[in-house]
Image (cartoon, grey):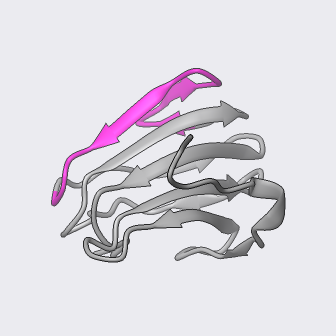
Amino acid sequence: MFQYLARANDKPWQPGPYAGVELKILHQHEVTGGLVILRKFAAGTQVPAHTHPVANEWAYILSGEWIESEVSHGPGTLLHAPRGERHGPHLAKTEVVSLTVFDGPLTVA
């Protein structure tokens, strides 16, 4: 038996750190602040280049088309941004949903 269970349909969408981005928090670690989330980017959403100063980011694209540094990525793509390293800008060419893991608190700089 798994020690934790979350059903995405039971979790609400919440505003993300940028306009056009919504988050569904599936799990937040009590000690580290790490997160497992679904992220939804509305079609046309642009996220400026940024860093996550205290967390590594892993994003797995479930649906949609994502443009990163003029390269298109679709479902089945895994993206990684190491803690403190600048990444982006990002563009959601269509609505994009990703399963994303931060191993620390979600902060943006």
Residue beneath the point at 52% across and 35% down:
60
Q: Is-magenta flag for residue 68?
A: yes
Residue 27 placement, left or right of 89: right
Is residue 42 visible in the rendered image? The answer is no
Find the magenta span and give its range. 67-84
Residue beneath the point at 26% across and 71% down:
32
Residue beneath the point at 17% across and 53% down:
85
Residue 17 image offset from top left, x and y in percent: 52, 76
* Total marks placed: 0
Residue found at the very far front of the displayed protein: 1
Q: Quadrant of the N terminus?
A: top right
Residue 58 placement, left or right of 44: left
Residue 49 image offset from top left, x and y in percent: 36, 59
The quarter of the displayed image where residue 106 is located: bottom left
Residue 15 image offset from top left, x and y in percent: 67, 78
Q: Is-magenta flag for residue 80?
A: yes
The quarter of the displayed image where residue 38 is located: bottom right
Residue 100 image offset from top left, x and y in percent: 49, 49
Residue 24 placement, left or right of 55: right
Residue beneath the point at 67% across and 33% down:
62
Q: Nearer the viewer, residue 36 or 31?
A: 31
Q: In this view, does 28 lie above or below 1?
A: below
Residue found at the very far left of the displayed protein: 84
Q: In this view, does 37 lie above or below 12?
A: above
Is residue 66 visible in the rendered image? The answer is yes
Q: Which of 32 and 58 is in front in this view?
A: 32
